[in-house]
């Protein structure tokens, strides 16, 4: 099953001028289960461009206390063939993981992925996070195995870096480029 986003696509100009709650509603899902990121960014408007908006959102994550940041990371889903097949992911994660072919994994590959995920989570205390659109399916397996062996602090930073990639792609889907033009 392919899910499509039903989010309206406002322009940056519209985001800059809309009510606080509407801004949060429009962008609250860009960071997985973390509308507080959009809440923080809403207070910093107006934004000159989408990169400035993204930077403000990332700054909110990076400024959060460590415990909150770990909870934020833990709110992200693991890469999972069964979750893709069952449709239990957010629409964004569903589309992203499906685009990487995770829903098409053979049973043995799905089980291997689950084992790798568990090993990673046990070692680092949060799920493996990767911008799946930057990898092949087998590249994801290799990256997961490799990153499991890293120091947790290094992985914490890498998880946040990957979230930066993911959220930037999501913003590009949610924000219409160009300014409002007078008719």
Image: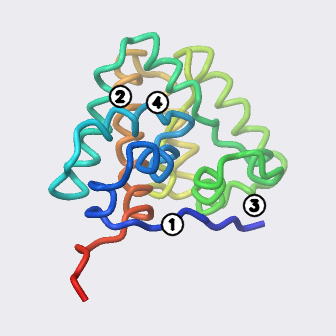
Residue occupying image coordinates x 29% and y 47%:
54
| Disc on res. 8 | 1
* Nearer the camera: disc 1 or disc 4: 1
Q: CA distance from mark 2 to mark 4?
A: 22 Å
Q: CA distance from mark 1 to mark 3?
A: 30 Å
Of the pair 24 and 78, the residue shown nearer to us: 24
Asked whether, in this view, residue 46 is left or right of residue 15, the answer is left
**Residue that label 3 marks:** 104
Quadrant position of the C terminus in the picture: bottom left
Of the pair 183 and 73, the residue shown nearer to us: 183
* Nearer the camera: disc 1 or disc 2: 1
Residue occupying image coordinates x 29% and y 71%:
177
Q: Quadrant of residue 100?
A: bottom right
Location of residue 181 with respect to 21 vertically, above or below: below
Say if mark 4 contacts mark 3, CB within 8 Å.
no
- Mark earlier in primary sequence (4, 3): 3
**Residue that label 4 marks:** 147
Q: CA distance from mark 1 to mark 2?
A: 24 Å
Residue occupying image coordinates x 46% and y 16%:
68
| Disc on res. 61 | 2
Location of residue 175 with respect to 181 vertically, above or below: above
Of the pair 45 and 59, the residue shown nearer to us: 45
């Amino acid at each position: 099953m392919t899910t499509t986003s039903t989010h309206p696509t406002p322009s940056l100009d519209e985001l800059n001028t809309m009510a606080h709650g509407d801004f949060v509603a429009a962008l609250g899902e860009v960071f997985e289960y973390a509308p507080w990121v959009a809440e923080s960014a809403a207070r910093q408007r107006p934004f000159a461009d989408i990169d400035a908006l993204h930077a403000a959102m990332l700054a909110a994550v990076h400024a959060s206390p460590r415990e909150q940041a770990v909870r934020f990371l833990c709110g992200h889903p693991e890469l999972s063939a069964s979750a893709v097949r069952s449709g239990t992911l957010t629409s964004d994660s569903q589309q992203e993981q499906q685009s990487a072919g995770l829903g098409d994994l053979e049973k043995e590959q799905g089980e291997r992925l689950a084992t790798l995920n568990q090993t990673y989570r046990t070692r680092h205390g949060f799920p493996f996070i990767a911008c799946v659109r930057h990898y092949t399916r087998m590249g994801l397996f290799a990256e997961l195995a490799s990153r499991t062996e890293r120091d947790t602090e290094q992985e914490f930073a890498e998880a946040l870096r990957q979230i930066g990639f993911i959220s930037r792609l999501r913003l590009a889907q949610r924000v219409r480029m160009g300014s409002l033009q007078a008719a």
